C-alpha cells in the first residue's frame, strides 16, 4: 500500500503522491496541520533570517493595496476614472457604512484611514486563498490576526486612558454600575477579564478560525476531486469538483465578511473607549 511521502523535517510541508487515486491501494492524503507549514524561502530555523511563503504573500499583498490606492488617488479628478471610482467606492463604504455608523462622523473621521487600511489588508490576505499558485490565506496563520488584534487592543486601551483617566478606565473595563447592587463585584470581575483578556483573544481567533477552516475545506474537496478520479470514482470526483467550486464561491463571501467583522468590532471598541461612562 502506498503511503503519503513524509519529509524528515517536521517543519516542512508534507507531500503526497500525486499519482495516488482510489482503488490504487493508497490511502486518502487528507489535509492537516502540515498543510499550513512551509519551507523557508530565505534562511532557516537556526539563522536570524527567516522568510517563507506566508511572509511573501503578506508583503506582496501590502504592495498591491498601497499600489492600488496610490494609482487611484495620485492624480484625483473631479470626474473620476474607473480606478478612482472603484477606490472611492471602497473607501466610502468603510467610512460611511462602518466608521460613521459606529463611531459617528465627528469622532470617527480621524480613524477612517486606519479602519480602511485594516479592512483592505485583511481582505487581501484572505483573498490569497483562491489566487492560483498562492492558494493560501495568510490570516490562517494565527500570528497575523494576533498582531492586528494587538494593534487594536493597544489603541483601545490608550484611547480609554486618554479620554477617561485611570478611574474612568477602570470603570469602563469593569462595567461599573451601582444599580447592579450586590452582584456588582462579580459583574466587575467578569467584565474585567472579558475586556482585557477575552476580547483581544476572540478578536484574533474569529478571523483565524474562519480562514483556517475555510482553507481546510477547500483543500479537502480539491484533493478529493483528484483522488477519486479513477474508475467508478470519477462520478464522485465530479461531485467533489462541484463542491470545490461552491466552496470557493462561499469562501469569497466569507473572506469579505470576516474583514468586515474585524473592522466593525474595531470600531465598536473605539466607540466604547470614547463614550462617556455613566
Image: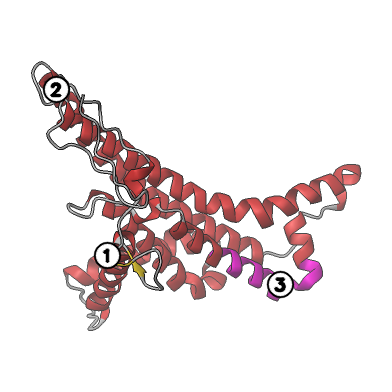
- Horizontal and vertical percent position of residue 77: 22, 80
Mark 3 or 2: the one toward you: 2
Q: Is mark 3 in CB contact (under 8 Å) with mark 1?
A: no
Spatial distance from mark 3 to mark 1, Cα to Cα?
43 Å
In this view, which residue lies farthest toward the top? 232
Q: Secondary structure at mark 2?
A: loop
Q: Which residues are magenta?
A: 152-168
Q: Residue furthest left?
A: 231
Q: Residue at x 30, y 43 (%)?
A: 251
* Residue 43, quarter of the rendered image: bottom left
Mark 1: few/some/many CA within 10 Å (<14, 14-19, 20+): few
Image quadrant in which the N terminus is located: top left
Q: Most prominent secondary structure in the magenta stretch?
A: helix
List the residue tagged with mark 3: 161
8 to 276, vertically: above or below: above
**Which numbered circle lies on residue 24?**
2
Q: Residue furthest front?
A: 8
Q: Nearer the viewer, mark 3 or mark 1?
A: 1
The residue identified by callout 1 is 41
Q: Secondary structure under badge 1?
A: loop
| Residue 160, x across and y down, in percent | 68, 69
Q: Is residue 235 left or right of residue 59?
A: left
Residue depicted at x 21% and y 36%: 222
| Residue at x 64% of width, y 61% of height | 272
Position above or below: 5 against 115: above
Looking at the image, is 136 positioned above or below residue 118?
Answer: above
N-term mark: 1 or 2: 2
Number of residues whose C-alpha sits closer than 10 Å to that of mark 3, classed few (under 14), some (14–19) or many (20 or more): some
The residue tagged with tag 3: helix, strand or loop? helix
Do the CB atoms of the residues marked 1 and 2 lie less than 8 Å apart? no
Q: x, y percentage for residue 166?
A: 78, 71
In the depicted view, which residue is nearer to us: 264 or 146? Answer: 146
Amino acid at each position: 500500500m502506498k503511503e503519503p511521502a513524509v519529509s524528515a523535517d517536521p517543519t516542512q510541508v508534507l507531500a503526497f503522491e500525486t499519482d495516488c487515486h482510489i482503488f490504487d491501494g493508497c490511502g486518502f492524503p487528507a489535509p492537516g496541520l502540515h498543510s499550513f507549514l512551509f519551507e523557508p524561502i530565505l534562511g532557516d530555523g537556526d539563522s536570524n533570517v527567516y522568510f517563507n511563503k506566508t511572509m511573501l504573500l503578506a508583503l506582496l499583498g501590502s504592495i498591491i493595496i498601497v499600489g492600488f490606492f496610490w494609482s487611484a488617488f495620485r492624480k484625483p479628478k473631479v470626474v473620476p476614472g474607473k480606478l478612482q471610482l472603484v477606490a472611492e467606492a471602497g473607501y466610502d463604504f468603510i467610512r460611511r457604512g462602518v466608521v460613521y455608523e459606529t463611531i459617528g462622523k465627528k469622532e470617527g473621521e480621524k480613524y477612517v484611514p486606519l479602519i480602511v487600511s485594516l479592512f483592505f489588508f485583511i481582505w487581501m490576505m484572505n483573498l490569497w486563498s483562491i489566487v492560483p499558485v498562492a492558494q493560501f490565506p495568510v490570516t490562517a496563520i494565527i500570528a497575523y490576526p494576533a498582531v492586528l488584534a494587538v494593534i487594536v487592543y493597544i489603541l483601545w486601551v490608550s484611547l480609554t486612558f486618554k479620554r477617561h483617566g485611570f478611574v474612568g478606565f477602570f470603570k469602563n473595563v469593569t462595567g461599573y454600575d451601582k444599580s447592579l447592587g450586590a452582584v456588582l463585584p462579580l459583574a466587575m470581575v467578569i467584565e474585567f477579564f472579558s475586556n482585557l483578556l477575552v476580547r483581544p483573544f476572540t478578536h484574533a481567533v474569529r478571523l483565524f478560525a474562519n480562514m483556517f477552516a475555510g482553507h481546510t475545506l477547500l483543500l479537502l474537496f480539491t484533493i478529493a476531486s483528484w483522488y477519486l478520479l479513477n474508475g467508478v470514482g470519477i462520478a464522485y470526483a465530479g461531485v467533489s469538483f462541484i463542491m470545490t467550486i461552491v466552496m470557493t464561491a462561499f469562501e469569497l463571501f466569507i473572506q469579505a465578511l470576516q474583514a468586515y467583522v474585524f473592522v466593525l468590532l474595531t470600531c465598536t471598541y473605539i466607540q466604547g473607549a470614547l463614550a462617556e461612562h455613566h
